[in-house]
Amino acid sequence: MTSKKTRRFDEVRAGEALPELAIPITVPLIAGGAIATRDYFPGHHDAEAARKLGSPHIFMNILTTSGLVQRFVEGWAGPGARFGSLKIKLGAPNYPGDTMTFTGEVSGCDADKRSVEVTLKGKNSMGNHVTGTVSVVLP
Amino acid sequence: MLETKLAEQDWMTEVRAMVGREYGRVYAWDEVNAPMIRQWCEIMGVENPLYTDAAFAATTEYGAIVAPPAMLQAWCLEGLHPNNYPPGSTTENPYEVLRLMEGQGYQSVVAVNSDLTFERYVKVGEKLYYTTRLDAVGEQKTTALGTGYFVTLIMSFFSEKPGGNEKVGELLFRVFKFRPANAQPGADAPKTEAAPAAPKIKRPKPGVSDDTRFFWEGAAAGKLLIQRCKCCGTLRHPPGPVCTKCHSFEWDTVESAGKGSIYSFVVMHYPEVPPFDYPNPVGLIELDEGVRLIAGLVGVKRNEIAIGQRVQVEFQSFDDGELTLPLFRPVAP
């Protein structure tokens, strides 16, 4: 992956769409994501505990959602992009068996800072799991 | 009733007095380290070599591996045992306002916003901590989930340095602390291992009456049917029992050719309600037969919809054939 190119600020235009990214939501992703972010809340790894909370299954934690948002934007921007902010609003939960599809577009360009703002959403079968904006500085 | 209200005001006064309060340091158990970074990247599917490949990282402005920015908060979580923070951490509970609300019956919580901002990336070996400020407690709100309060906390993350600690980022975290609208006791939760992964949200169904049944049955059969007065031949839509022109109750239907033009339209942006796609364009279509009907628009870009645009009906089936809707697609004039 070291050869992967970083997008240059001058190549990016407002309105440009990011390539869609469909992420299968699985038990290993939810439970593994929770543990990798040091979040041991039972609803993220214990199905029985999640059901007692009124959920049909374990559900994704926020820190995993943030990680996947980083992956979506970084996958498009490239390894040289530097994140300035990652702001998300949570919606419908991510349960195993679903698929979350990220879509996004460039919603602003700041030439002085060489900073690009991406507005995105990650949608599953119940609606938007996450909506948000990410700003990255490009070379 | 009056007593209850006064009591609520008392505890809310206590809550309001807490706004602006700063809470001391909560340290990270581990310094920023490569194994935790690599495992985070593995599960997230993040493939930037900046985080895992020392040789590549050496060629960047950092000169060494840094942590993925979205990982910032993870460094300082307590881990398996709740409230078990590393030595040196504050003994105050930065979330005490939430405990206070729980005591008043607002036992449920849902995260609403997580806004991370980064001053800089952090390198392997850095020791992080954060401090917390209770930024805001909103007015009481009732949402679909229940009644409660939006609570905003701001956590500032620092790197401990001999020459002075350095701020590396910030997290604005907003939760809704609420009394559930439909409290579900745990015992009632489904127990089967094969529980459906997620409840599928279906399209809302139209209310069907004796006056409108023909329209929906026609749609299911791929026909756009319009009501016609048997006495004077006047077409009418939406359907009704009486001819608005001659007041006759006698009616039959005629199949529309499904061609028309956009008489007016709206584009729904917010709120986004599942299972619809947004932006969601909805047209008032004037059929060539003369009546108008409201229907979804397909195959249009929101900026290109124009009044007068020629359209043609098509039928789309939803939810495994439970519902068929006439939709309109632009065609050449």
Image (cartoon, coloured by chain):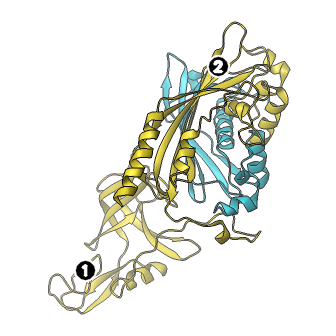
Dot label at residue B120: 2
* Colour chain B is painted in: yellow
Q: Is residue B311 or residue B67 the one in the foreground?
A: B67
The x and y percentages for residue A46 are 76, 56
The x and y percentages for residue A90 are 56, 47
The quarter of the picture where the N terminus of chain A appears is top right
| Amino acid type shown at disc 2 | Arg
Q: Is residue A62 or residue A67 the one in the foreground?
A: A62
The x and y percentages for residue B6 are 37, 51
B146 vs A8, left or right, is: left
Q: Can you say whether A59 is above or below A74 in the image? A: below
Residue that carries the numbered disc 1 in the rendered image: B235
What chain is the cyan one? Answer: A
The x and y percentages for residue B200 are 60, 66
For image coordinates 46% across by 59% down, the residue present is B144
Total marks in image = 2
| Amino acid type shown at disc 1 | Leu
Question: In this view, which residue lies farthest toward the left?
Answer: B246
Q: Can you say whether B281 is above or below B242 in the image? A: above
The quarter of the picture where the C terminus of chain A appears is top right
| Element under disc 1 | strand
| Element under disc 2 | loop
Q: Is residue B234 or residue A101 the one in the foreground?
A: A101
Give the mark toward the camera: 1 or 2: 2
For image coordinates 24% across by 93% down, the residue present is B250
Q: Which of the chains bears the disc numbered 1?
A: B
